[in-house]
Image (cartoon, rainbow, N blue to C red):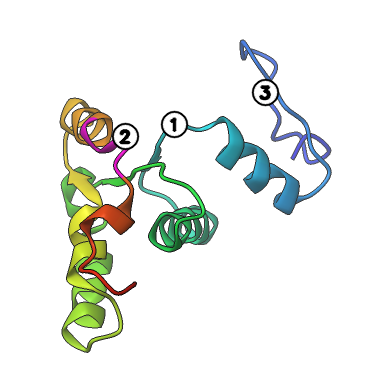
């Protein structure tokens, strides 16, 4: 991103890595939670990945969507269809924070810190 002039110089802290895999690993290591703002394919890919990491126990960082003006509602409805079809457990979808207000989203994420999704699943697995 720096080479494409997308890098910023007005930040208090900047980490430069060589690959997207390194970027994601560093994000997972440094983050306490993930809040997905409205965005494009890269944003969607990253939030789905960290959400799946939470589900399989790779980390316990809570995940949320800032659903400004219903931006993520179509996606969340489609994910509900995956639950209805039996491909995703209801507990996994219910674990994600969805809020249209930043304060509410942050409060929801804070409430889920330290609570692993495995604690919410019925005995016997994922």
Residue at screen point 42% across, 50% down: 39
Q: Which residue is mark 3?
A: 8
Residue 32, disc: 1
Q: Position of residue 7 (x, y in %)?
A: 71, 30
CA gap, disc 1 and disc 3: 23 Å
> Which segment did they paint magenta?
111-115
Mark with earlier residue (1, 3): 3
Mark with earlier residue (2, 3): 3
Q: Nearer the viewer, residue 19 or 86?
A: 86
Name the outermost residue toward the bottom.
Answer: 85
CA gap, disc 2 and disc 1: 8 Å
Residue at screen point 72% across, 53% down: 21
Q: Please tell me whether mark 1 sits on a helix, a strand or a loop.
A: loop
CA gap, disc 2 and disc 3: 29 Å
Residue 113, disc: 2
Circle 2 packing at 10 Å, graded few (<14), some (14-19), many (20+), is some
Q: Quadrant of residue 14?
A: top right
Q: Position of residue 65 (x, y in %)?
A: 29, 47
Quadrant including the C terminus: bottom left
Q: Is residue 1 left or right of residue 39?
A: right
Residue 16, disc: none
Secondary structure of the magenta portion, mostly?
loop
Q: Please tell me whether mark 3 sits on a helix, a strand or a loop.
A: loop
Mark with earlier residue (2, 1): 1
Decide whether residue 95 is among the magenta residues. Answer: no
């Amino acid at each position: 991103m720096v080479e494409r002039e997308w890098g910023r110089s007005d930040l208090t802290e900047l980490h430069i890595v060589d690959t997207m895999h390194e970027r994601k690993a560093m994000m997972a290591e440094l983050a306490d939670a993930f809040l997905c703002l409205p965005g494009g394919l890269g944003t969607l890919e990253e939030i789905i990945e960290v959400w799946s990491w939470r589900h399989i126990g790779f980390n316990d960082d809570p995940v949320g969507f800032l659903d400004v003006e219903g931006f993520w509602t179509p996606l969340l409805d489609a994910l509900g269809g995956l639950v209805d079809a039996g491909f995703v457990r209801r507990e996994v979808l219910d674990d994600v924070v969805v809020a249209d207000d930043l304060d509410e989203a942050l409060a929801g994420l804070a409430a889920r810190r330290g609570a692993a999704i495995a604690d919410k699943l019925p005995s016997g697995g994922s």
